[in-house]
């Protein structure tokens, strides 16, 4: 369910080895939770240079009146308490 106060939503999916926590919503909100980035198929740390570039692209698209959504995921172990507050 989408949270208008958080401007994002979450889904937790079992993948056999554990869970995958997916989120989508306002790109600036999703970006706040990101630590890594997929660059040409390689996962790299999300540093300030990458983050600034993403924020500039978001702003450019929004200025063109385009709707922009952010997507992120995190793999979680089977041992995670699915009732905990995992979106933080």
Image (tube, rainbow, N blue to C red):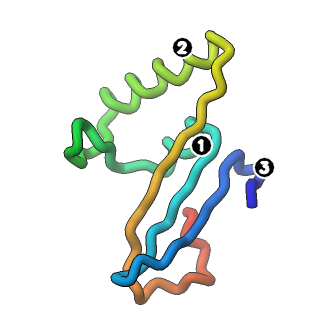
Which of the numbered marks, if any, corresponds to residue 62? none
| Of the two numbered discs 3 and 2 in the rendering, the one whose residue sits closer to the viewer | 2
Q: Residue 82: percent from the left, percent from the top?
A: 56, 82
Q: Return the residue at label 2.
A: 60
Q: Return the residue at label 1.
A: 29
Q: Residue 45: percent from the left, percent from the top?
A: 26, 45
| Separation of residues labelled 1 and 2 (CA atoms) | 17 Å
Which quadrant holds the N terminus?
bottom right
Q: Are marks 3 and 1 in contact (CB under 8 Å)?
A: no
Mark 2, Cα crowd under 10 Å, few <14 / some 14-19 / many 20+, is: few
Residue 82 placement, left or right of 37: right
Residue 4 placement, left or right of 27: right
- Secondary-structure class at tag 3: loop
| Separation of residues labelled 3 and 2 (CA atoms) | 24 Å
Q: Return the residue at label 3.
A: 5
Above or below, 23 against 45 in this view is below
Mark 1, Cα crowd under 10 Å, few <14 / some 14-19 / many 20+, is: some
- Compare marks 3 and 2 and give the one earlier in the sequence: 3
Above or below, 3 against 58 in this view is below
Above or below, 62 against 24 in this view is above
Which quadrant holds the C terminus?
bottom right
Mark 3, Cα crowd under 10 Å, few <14 / some 14-19 / many 20+, is: few
């Amino acid at each position: 369910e989408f949270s208008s106060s958080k401007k994002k939503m979450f889904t937790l999916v079992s993948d056999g080895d554990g869970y995958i926590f997916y989120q989508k919503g306002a790109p600036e909100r999703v970006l706040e939770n990101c630590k890594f980035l997929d660059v040409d198929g390689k996962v790299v740390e999300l540093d300030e240079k990458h983050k600034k570039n993403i924020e500039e692209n978001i702003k450019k698209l929004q200025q063109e009146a385009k709707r922009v959504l952010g997507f992120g995921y995190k793999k979680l172990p089977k041992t995670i308490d699915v009732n905990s507050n995992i979106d933080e």
